[in-house]
Amino acid sequence: MTLKITIKGKEYEVDVSEEPGGKIKVRINGQDYVFNANSKEVVAQEPLTISSAESAEKDVKAPLNGTVSEIFVKEKDDVKKGQKLLTLSAMKMENEIVSETNGKIKKIFVKKGQNVKEGNILISFL
Amino acid sequence: MISIKRFKKISSTNEKAKGFKPWTVLVAEEQGAGYGRKGSQWFSPKGGLYFSLVLPKSDIHDLQILTILAGFAVAKAIKDNFDLEPLIKLPNDVLINGKKVCGILTENIVGKEVKFSVIGIGLNTNIKEFPADLKKTATSLQLELKKEINNEKIMKEVVLELEKQLKTII
């Protein structure tokens, strides 16, 4: 099972497979990491994928490929529904990304001037 | 269906337009803080033509051709009214004799989907002189034709053409 995961704009190709002896092999961009499936080490890994439907629902994603031209908020900010979060310059248009909900910003994954691809997570909410 | 709101002087027709309903056109005689892409300034003294059209929500991928359609509408109005050869510099400028006469800025307001869009058009009509930093790259219809331009007529022609074009995609 090969997955393509983008973290902070960098793309990782991740392949997960079972190895003899109940081990799990995780290949990230060609580098292999082998774990005992039952070890605590595996449990302690930070999840690389979007962890739940709920968090995915709250993530703000890039609507199309472009460049982050301005960021108007910072982490831990309380924002209101409709508040301007950032602008994404794409296809010579300025796209003003606004919040869909009232909430607190957990993490900003992008910087001003950064190129992003459609679907990349830009901002997550608590 | 299109309603026109007129202003003597506002900071920016695009910015102001964000509070209005779709199919509203805002026209200003002068902009205090006209802007282009990435916040660049747009020289907006009295005499020029500055207007923005609010559009309803659309598919963001379709919106990519909005600016091109607006450029086409401006170039057509220039060509139909004057003995000039406008050149559309894709996707958002119109040039005459190699100098910029019009800039177009499309802004989309996006949540989970596009809520609405604003197309702003700055057309250098009756501008007699540009600041030193723009002289080499900008021109106006008045400078090219040595005559006064009817802003109202040009604005209406562009808006009607835009409406006609946009209805094919929205």
Image (cartoon, coloured by chain):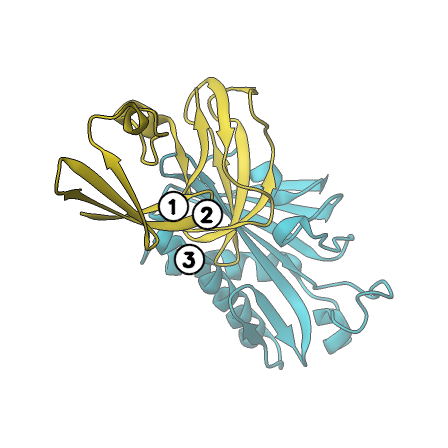
Chain colours: A yellow, B cyan
Say what amino acid the circle numbered 3 marks: Gln
Q: Position of residue B154 (x, y in %)?
A: 59, 62
Q: Residue A29 location in percent, x, y?
A: 35, 53
Does B106 sit above or below residue B112?
Answer: below
Tell me if label 1 and label 2 are in contact, CB under 8 Å.
Answer: yes
| Disc 3: CA contacts within 10 A as few (<14), some (14-19) or many (>=20) | some
On what subunit does the disc labeled 1 rest?
A
Question: Identity of the amino acid at label 1?
Answer: Thr
Residue position marked by numbered label 3 in the rendering: B64
> For mark 1, what is the residue?
A6
Which residue is rendered at x = 56% and y = 72% of the image?
B89
Left or right: residue A109 compared with residue A54 = right
Answer whether residue B19 is visible to the viewer in this image. Answer: no
Depth check: give the residue in front, B54 or B25.
Answer: B54
Q: Are marks 1 and 3 on the same chain?
A: no
Number of other residues with Cα within 10 Å of mark 2, as a class: few under 14, some 14 to 19, many 20 or more:
some
Q: Secondary structure at mark 3?
A: loop
Co-location on one chain, circles 3 and 2: no
Residue B50 higher or lower than A20, as above or below:
below
Query: In which quarter of the view is residue B144 placed?
Result: bottom right
Q: Quadrant of residue B49?
A: bottom right
Q: Is residue B45 above or below residue A80?
A: below
- Taking the image as drawn, is residue B152 in sight? yes
Q: Chain of mark 3?
A: B
